[in-house]
Image (spheres, helix red, strand yellow):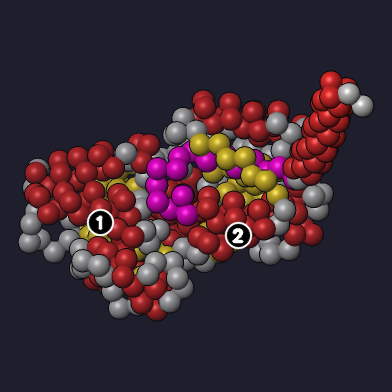
Amino acid sequence: MTKKNFILAAAVCGLILASCKKQKADFARANEETETSSKIAIGFSIDTLAIERWRRDCDVFLNTAKDLGADVIVQNSGNSVEVQNQQIEYLVKRGVKAVVIVPKDAESLGESVRLAKSKGIPVISYDRLLRNSPIDLYVTIDSHAVGTLMAQELLRKKPRGAFFCIYGPEEDFNMTLIRRGVESAIKDSRAKIVYNYWTDGWNYDLSYRKMAELLKAGSYPDAVIAGNDAVADSIIRAIGEFAPGRDIAVGGQDADIAGCQNVVNGKQAVTIYKPISELAAKSAEIAVALARGKSVKECGSINGSIDNGAGQIPVLWLHPTAVTAENMDEIVIKSGFHTRQEVYRN
């Protein structure tokens, strides 16, 4: 073989080898894509991830679903009802096998939910109840009990006097349930609710301004019920600025890190611990089961029902716990929800 022919043969062999390698890589990539595309996809639609609590929910949900062999497509609407409707429609078009929704507005997602249902996609309402929508399941922590526990603990501190209630947004149906729990606990006491306020869009500047306005006008409550710990923190800030030294008991919910720190520092009387990790994990387990064709009844764990305006909806209720400085270690730290260092760092 001449030198010229040898070089030509070597080049041809090189091209054949490269082609084989490429075919092998393409085949592997095709297999990988097929394997990925065969995974069950679940949609998770949430109104915001700006709040610490929701980031925790989302992380647990994602990790649990992944462990069960499902992919999760997360859509964050940034506190916009219009965007959340569009994102749910997008999830339907993506062909997800189940949709989990944390609604911005309890009453405004019915059309998107009906679209999902028309495609045979099961819908879970997560922690906040979707009203007048044909959902398959409501998974939540008992918000009526949250309000009852918060009020009961504040009544131990302030058994009589004026109570202010500064809730979250009125369109969040959990606030309605919390309010009912608060009022049921207070109705036979010597305390009286003298003021109710709804914080639009969970805007903590609004709750701060409202509390500051009331204090500057000389309206001093004995206790304040807050929609969550972030609202409570804004109220505590206003009290520190406009009523320093006054003994005003404040209650919140979620046991977020700032709320727990306020409790152990004596600035907040109570926060309500909600088993969020359990809620998110169970919701992911049920969503994967529904996506694989199981019925709600086959998923188990259902322990109640609620009328959402469209019918009786099966519910998985989890139960909250009141947390004070006295039981912080036992409830929050022992459960691993926060570390001791985080809670007591100040």
Residue sitting nearer the eye, 112 or 148: 112
Q: Tag on residue 224?
A: 1
Where residue 61 appears, as percent x and y from the top left, is 58, 53
Please tell me whether residue 261 is drawn above or below residue 131 in the rendered image.
below
Crowd rating for badge 2 (residues with CA inside 10 Å; few <14, some 14–19, many 20+): many
| Residue at position x 82%, y 49% in the image | 293
Residues tagged 1 and 2 counted as in contact (Cβ below 8 A): no
How far is the residue under mark 1 from the one under mark 2?
32 Å
Residue at image location 36% in from the left, 53% down from the top: 228
Amino acid type, label 2: Ala
Left-right relation of 5 to 108 = right
Classify mark 1: helix, strand or loop: strand
In the rendered view, does 144 fall on the left or right side of 192? right
Label located before the other in sequence (1 or 2): 1
Residue 213, by quadrant, is top left
Camera-nearest label, 1 or 2? 2
Name the amino acid type tagged 1.
Val
Tell me, yes or no, whether the highlighted magenta stretch contains residue 19: no
* Residue annotated with mark 2: 281
